């Protein structure tokens, strides 16, 4: 059993990666637009650090005990599903650069980038499992999903109820290596800001060597952020 688990493909590459959690407080970041802008500035600082090759952020790290959100959705233009058979998916918010940093492969379409601003058309990336559940073998790029807006209180919100699929990424095992990957939606941080994020840094060497530099960057950015 151990050998089988060891040989299981998790959908990400943790080699050379450092992670840590940040929480932007309401006092210094009173509305959600300041939260997403704050994380963009933080990631830019980290990308400039010697030894850091890529940087991203996510609400949920794979194989962690972090909180997730499981919500219902529907496909625009499709008849409503029978009661009790509505599709569900896990919601995860990510900053631009997360998939590249975590080593999650792109299957179709594109990753999130500077186009996915708060005032731009709403975008979403789905994993293979959700694409297969909703569309079978049909290309899902350009299809729209409905009913996905949601507020998570002061912590964050998905701002758009209708959004367009711009990419498909490989399945990532979040709960356990023994379990198949669950249907997942990824939202760009600008369009789905969230206060508590895990920063992910891919380094060119031992990630432990940049720990002190990472702490200094956070303190220089905002000493009230732990």
Image: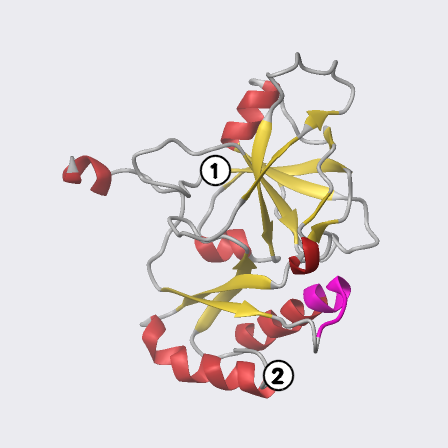
Residue at 75% across, 38% down: 163
Please, what secondary structure does the residue beneath circle 2 have? Answer: loop
Q: Earlier in the sequence, mark 1 or mark 2?
A: 1
Residue 43 visible to the viewer? yes
In the drawing, does residue 118 fall left or right of residue 199? right
Establish if 202 lies above or below 3.
below
User: Neighbour class for label 2 at 10 Å: few (<14), some, many (≥20)?
Assistant: some
Dot 1 corresponds to which residue?
Answer: 170
Dot 2 corresponds to which residue?
Answer: 222
Give the image location of residue 167, x and y in percent. Answer: 62, 38
Give the image location of residue 124, x and y in percent. Answer: 67, 41
Residue 56 occupies which quadrant of the picture? bottom right
Give the image location of residue 60, x and y in percent. Answer: 49, 52
Stretch in magenta: 29-36
Give the image location of residue 29, x and y in percent. Answer: 71, 73
Q: Are marks 1 and 2 in contact (CB under 8 Å)?
A: no
In the drawing, does residue 210 fall left or right of residue 183? left
Residue 223 colored in magenta in the image? no
The quadrant of the picture occupied by the N terminus is top left
Residue at 52% across, 32% down: 183
Residue 108 visible to the viewer? no
In the drawing, does residue 179 fall left or right of residue 56? left
Residue at 53% across, 74% down: 46
Tag shown at residue 145:
none
Residue at 48% across, 43% down: 105
Figure coloring? secondary structure
Name the foreground residue: 126 vs 54.
126
The mark closer to the camera, 1 or 2, is 2
User: Neighbour class for label 1 at 10 Å: few (<14), some, many (≥20)?
Assistant: many
Secondary structure that dominates the magenta span: helix
Please, what secondary structure does the residue beneath circle 1 have? Answer: loop
Establish if 165 lies above or below 98.
above
């Amino acid at each position: 059993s151990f050998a089988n688990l060891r040989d299981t493909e998790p959908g990400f590459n943790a080699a050379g990666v450092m992670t840590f959690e940040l929480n932007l407080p309401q006092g210094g970041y009173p509305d959600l637009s300041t939260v997403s802008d704050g994380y963009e500035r933080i990631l830019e600082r980290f990308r400039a650090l010697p030894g850091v090759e890529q940087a991203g952020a996510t609400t949920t790290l794979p194989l962690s005990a972090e909180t997730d959100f499981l919500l219902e959705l529907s496909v625009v233009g499709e008849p409503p599903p029978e009661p009790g058979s509505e599709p569900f998916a896990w919601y995860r918010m990510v900053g631009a650069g997360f998939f590249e940093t975590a080593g999650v492969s792109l299957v179709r379409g594109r990753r999130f980038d500077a186009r996915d601003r708060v005032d731009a058309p709403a975008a979403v990336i789905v994993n293979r499992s959700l694409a297969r559940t909703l569309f079978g073998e049909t290309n899902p790029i350009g299809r729209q999903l409905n009913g996905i807006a949601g507020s998570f209180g002061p912590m964050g919100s998905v701002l758009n109820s209708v959004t367009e699929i711009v990419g498909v990424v490989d399945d990532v095992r979040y709960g356990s290596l023994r379990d198949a990957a669950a249907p997942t939606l990824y939202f760009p941080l600008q369009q789905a800001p969230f206060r508590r994020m895990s920063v992910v840094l891919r380094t060119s060497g031992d990630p432990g060597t940049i720990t002190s530099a990472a702490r200094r960057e956070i303190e220089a950015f905002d000493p009230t952020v732990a």
